[in-house]
Image: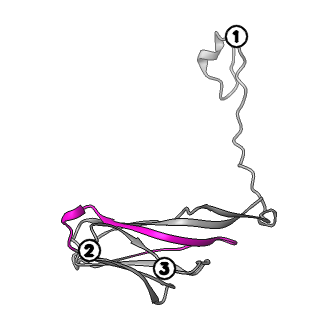
Amino acid sequence: MTARWPAGWHPAMRAGTQRQRGLVAHRAGRVPMERFTRAVQGVPLTGGQAQGVVPGSGTITLKVGPQGLGNVWYPVQCVVSTTTGALDTSTCAVYLGSQAQQNLQGGQSYSGGGDTVALAVVSMSPGDLLIAIWEGAVPGAVAAFNVQGTMDALAY
């Protein structure tokens, strides 16, 4: 008589001393939105990075902003750069605005290949954006934008 093994058992388990137990995938727990009630203030700003490849026109626009209920950003500066580096003669203007328009210039860099731009903007709520626009960048280079500062968020 031949031994029969249950489905899912590996044949190598025949000689083993430990019984194979069926593993079941479980979905990770979900915290309900209503539980996020505690405000955390002054934490390092996260999510303020964007990058993109400069098209043939040499002009690229990158946008970042706070997302989610209770997130408020207090940006202090942003670092702009391209993979061309110090040899890049492009300029980069940073604006505070929304999806539809940029309405307040926050800073200007005449060295778009690598520079730190100090920002003189108010706090930002979801819907507000920091918009970086490179002019005269090298086509094919990667432009990057990193916002630094603090933020408020909700925790549970």
Give the camera-side residue of 76 and 21.
76
Residue at 71% x, 15% y: name it.
Answer: 18
**65 part of magenta stretch:** yes
Q: Can residue 143 be seen in the rendering of this structure?
A: no
| Earlier-in-chain disc, 3 versus 1 | 1
Residue at 26% x, 61% y: name it.
Answer: 83
Which label is found at residue 76?
none
Q: Gap in Å between the C-alphas at discs 3 and 1? A: 68 Å
Disc 2 or disc 3, which is closer to the eye?
3
Give the camera-side residue of 118 and 44.
118
Residue 128 vs 67, above or below: the answer is: below
- Return the residue at label 3: 120
| Earlier-in-chain disc, 2 versus 3 | 2
Residue 26: x and y in percent read 72, 44
Q: Gap in Å between the C-alphas at discs 2 and 1? A: 62 Å
Instruction: Work out which quarter of the rendered image holds the C terminus and state it.
Output: bottom right
- Return the residue at label 1: 17
Disc 3 or disc 1, which is closer to the eye?
3
- Identified by mark 2, the residue type is Pro
- Return the residue at label 2: 55
Mark 1, secondary structure of its residue: loop
Start-end of magenta stretch = 62-89
**88 part of magenta stretch:** yes
Residue 52: x and y in percent read 35, 68
| Earlier-in-chain disc, 2 versus 1 | 1
Q: How crowded is mark 2: few (under 14 residues within 10 Å), some or many (20 or more)?
A: some
The outermost residue toward the left is 87
Mark 3, secondary structure of its residue: loop
Q: Quarter-wise, where is residue 140 in the image? A: bottom left
